[in-house]
Image (cartoon, grey):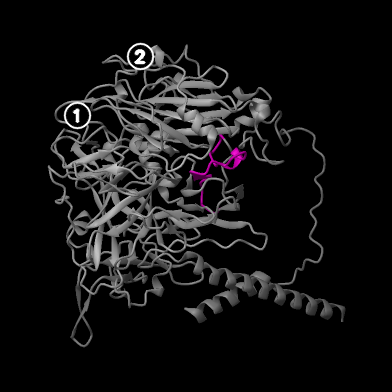
Amino acid sequence: MVADDCSSSFFGRTLIAVIQMLLVHLVAFLLYLPCAICWQKYADEIKMATPNSDGVYEFDLVLKHQLTMSHVRNSFGHLDILDYKPDEVTVLTMDRANSCFQKTFWVRSADQLEACDKTSPFVKDALNASTDTSSLEDVLIMHGLHQRVVTINGVSPGKTLIVPYNAEVIMRVKNRLLLEGVTVHLHGVDKKFSWYTDGVAYVQQCPISVNSNFAYRFYADTPGTHWYHGHLMSDRGDGLLGGFIIVKDNETYPNPAPGAPRFEFGKIRQYYALLQDWPVPTSAESWYSHVGETMKWLYGFDNNDNTCWTPTRISDGSNLGGAVPISAILVNDKGWHSQADIRSRPSALPLETFRIKTNEEIIIRFVNGGVAQELMFTIEEHDMYIIAADGVEVKPKKVGYTMQAVFKQAIQVDSVIIFSGERYDILIKHSGKPTRKVYPILIETIDTVSWTWKNTAPFVGLAKLEYEDVNAPETDEVDFNHSNCKKDSKCVVVNCPFGEFPPDKNFHCLNAVDLESAEIADPVDQQMIQKKTFSDDEFVEHFINMHYDSHVDGYMFKLPRGVPYFYEKEQKLSEVAMECDKTKCTNSSSRYDPNCQCFWHLTFPLNKIVQLTVYNMGKGGGNGTGYAHPLHIHGTHFYLMKVGYPSYNANGFLSGMNPDIPCASGLDSCNRLKWANKEWMMGNVPGMKEIPSSRDTVVVPVGGYVTLSTLTHATSLRFKATNPGWFFAHCHLMLHNMGGTAFAYRTGEPHEIPAPPDAYPHSCGDFEPTKAGGVQVGATTTASAPITTTKGSSTSGFSVAAVYTAIVIAFANMIR
């Protein structure tokens, strides 16, 4: 009787356990779909997130690998492999009638006994707005090929997160990748007094290990367009990135119409456009090829057609930095791998599409999240107005190449060049009345010269601007040659990495330094900008040479093995970081000298004005040898005070370095230099901007310099150092950053830096035991403790796992 009661009780407990496990499994399966909606024809409009019951904006970011162009067909994660075919395909059906399929997703047969390339239609006419594409909701298009990428909640890029200014935010990263540790940086958000939430691996935190969670909890203290991305080696190049926007209370935007009221958030349609130069090789393969100098074979070591890859140059003769072969230019999660298709039949391709109506203005927030390429975007027959750069509104300006240039309430341009890490908010309206249903948004690289100094065509990508109220067929017409740009009316291009386009190009540069902040409200900032000279007790000045593809001041930055804050307090930084020694790494050292691989870092005194002049000179900063570097400084925005360009010859090629920094011609290294004119020291630099723009990412031109200022920050850059903590500054080209074009900086003395929360992980896994564990063979041992079983365990053959498995299989067969 007792045995029967036990059996009955055990059966009851088992049944309950099985039901609970089955419910968990079912809920997980059902929840998987809505959090992984990938394919949709139209881009999402920007909408504010919803806080939790405590008013906190809480986001879980679950990181997993996912195969592009695949569909999950059941609860076990089994995949259907898909292909998209833009061609019209004629199939001979069983009744001998012809069946035509165009713009169709096809599914490959999973039957092992059938041919690998046997397919059947999965979704026909997928680009038609009336087609039911719900079965594609978990399909990640990317470049249209099959590749495992890092996804955030099932998508890449991750969904754009929009929160109010000064809101409390929790970003909880759940690492469910197979092998990789990760960190996540929120690019553009200063993180005042919370440096340890900034996400730089080993400088601010230890990597988030596989199967671990890590929560970033902070206040949204920096309004504007930002983005989040992985910050441990190559992870952002594999898909770990997404959008982030902080919206001010009652936020408004410039209206270019004279005398018109400003647009209001929520009353003007807005989109987010995250651009990427999606590479052919994996990011890891790119890195190993870079280190091993085998990049010639980035198309594959065993490529049957023996195609070699060669780098390219831009129109001033400098090299395209950090470049790798491109498979596609992505806009959000869509692009296409075939340049022939992009150029000949874009209407048949599943490209990102933004909607608009006649007489409507929209805002698109463009972000370059790519690994290397500076990209230029243009929208045919539409006026584009720059309203913000790096999240900060810019002042209207009189622009234009001809004498007919007019003053607008926003800066009107024809094209924008955007480097990795930069953001530009663009207000868009049609130049007249739309006559086409779809207008192309052209995104192209700016390399125009091959490695052998021959003219070359750019790599191109497209998105679409579709008019909802225009009834006309979509065409394949794209003006890839910019035929509307004429010699006597050149098109205005903002943010060139050089002083001006060559004379044979029908473009005119509006450089980043020409942009001005719409408002500098802080009186301390106003005084800092206007003041010409400073005293030692209020001002520090640094000169930094960012040259080659992996050096800052001659050093190749090497990450520490633990978070410096904790070790420096105990004067043990040398235990986890290789200190830099200029007696071992000299100006004459080889660029590959291991003595130059070290933890290069600077110290900015708290509450002092910091001016950084970052130059790009030496052998790594000349014609055919140098690279323009997009410099991103964490933890602060800075004022772009001045940009010094090199000299150019009649063909637009670099001919000499800017003489303001005395780098003699022919020198390999020009480190540790200062102004040629000593009277320029302590802030007394002529030609500084009276109303500079506020940025966090800026391009350092080859052969030239930028001067930045901040309270504490600075190309010439100037800022005031008011955010204590350990931060990071680096070139945002992925291979350059990985190679060492970076430095850490500490604002404030150790005792002035806010302490991270208790139990904050910081040793990053270093462990050295003092003695061997276990027992040496032959030594006397003590008896082992007896093995015990858990109370309540059963030896019955009735298995919870077996019952659960049987029910799950039955359930799966029901839903298939």
Q: Quadrant of residue 739?
A: top left
323 drawn magenta: no
Q: State the SS at label 2.
A: loop
Over which residues does the magenta segment extend?
Answer: 175-203
Report the disc number at residue 290.
none
Instruction: State which quadrant residue 392 falls in.
Output: top left
Give the structural element (helix, strand or loop) at label 1: loop
Give left or right: position of 786 versus 35: right
What residue lies at 15% left-to-right and 45% top-to-bottom? 489
Residue pointed to by mark 2: 676
Which residue occupies 80% across, 34% down?
780
Q: Is residue 218 left or right of residue 675?
A: right
Judge by depth and name the residue closer to the eye, 807 or 440. 440
Residue 799 left/right relative to 793: left
- Note whether residue 599 is visible: no
Query: Disc 2 or 1, which lies upstream in sequence?
Result: 1
For the residue carrying disc 2, how many other residues have a C-alpha within 10 Å: few (<14), some (14-19), or many (20+)?
A: few
Which residue is depicted at the point 69% across and 41% down? 757
Q: Position of residue 171 (x, y in %)?
A: 58, 52
Q: How far across and down, in percent of the image, does residue 488 sit?
A: 12, 43
* Circle 1 crowding by C-alpha within 10 Å: few under 14, some 14–19, many from 20: many
Q: In the current view of this chain or complex, which residue is farthest to the right?
A: 2
Q: Amino acid type of disc 2?
A: Ala
Q: Residue at x 66, y 63 (%)?
A: 53
Residue 479, visible in the rendered structure: yes
Q: Quadrant of residue 503?
A: top left
Instruction: Please say if 811 is above or below 674.
Output: below
